[in-house]
């Protein structure tokens, strides 16, 4: 997928999730949308954006990407919940959605910059070890 379309899809999914969480009432026929979009947003999207930032295209296959996305997403959600719980803001639905949305958009933006070539991974110069006698 082209980087512009990828970034647009991530931002569109984030906005769609926020609209579902805030605008759809919690009534039985419509709450499935909120549950589906909310769960996939928390369980997959933050980790997927971080993996796209950390790894080059073609480095990981689909199964590795999926497993790492879910594991990293739950880790990111847990750490952001820990920081929100310790802050004066507290853990509320708006604070969680805003913090996770911010993490997703920022990591997707940096992944987008890396995909188009404006952001390169730092290369560590390595020299052979010197042996002194």
Image (tube, helix red, strand yellow):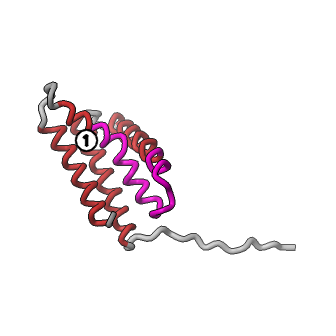
Q: Is residue 132 magenta?
A: no
Residue at 34% x, 34% y: name it. Answer: 85
- Determine which residue is flagged by label 1: 97
Q: Position of residue 32 (x, y in %)?
A: 21, 32
Above or below — where is 127 with respect to 55?
Answer: below
Residue at 16% x, 43% y: name it. Answer: 19
Q: Is residue 58 magenta?
A: yes
Q: Secondary structure at mark 1?
A: helix
Q: Position of residue 57 (x, y in %)?
A: 45, 63
Above or below — where is 126 with respect to 25?
Answer: below
Quadrant in the picture for residue 79: top left
List the single residue furthest toward the top.
Answer: 28
Above or below — where is 115 with respect to 75?
Answer: below
Q: Position of residue 16 (x, y in %)?
A: 19, 47
Q: Is residue 17 left or right of residue 55?
A: left
Question: Magenta stretch?
Answer: 38-67
């Amino acid at each position: 997928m082209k980087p512009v379309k990828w970034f647009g899809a991530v931002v569109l999914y984030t906005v769609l999730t926020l609209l579902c969480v805030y605008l759809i009432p919690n009534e039985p026929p419509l709450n499935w949308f909120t549950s589906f979009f909310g769960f996939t947003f928390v369980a997959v999207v933050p980790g997927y954006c971080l993996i796209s930032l950390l790894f080059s295209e073609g480095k990981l296959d689909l199964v590795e990407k999926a497993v790492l996305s879910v594991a990293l997403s739950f880790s990111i959600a847990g750490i952001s919940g820990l920081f929100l719980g310790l802050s004066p803001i507290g853990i509320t639905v708006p604070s969680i959605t805003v913090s996770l949305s911010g993490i997703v958009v920022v990591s997707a933006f940096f992944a987008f910059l890396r995909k188009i070539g404006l952001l390169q991974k730092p290369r560590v110069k390595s020299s052979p070890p010197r042996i002194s006698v």
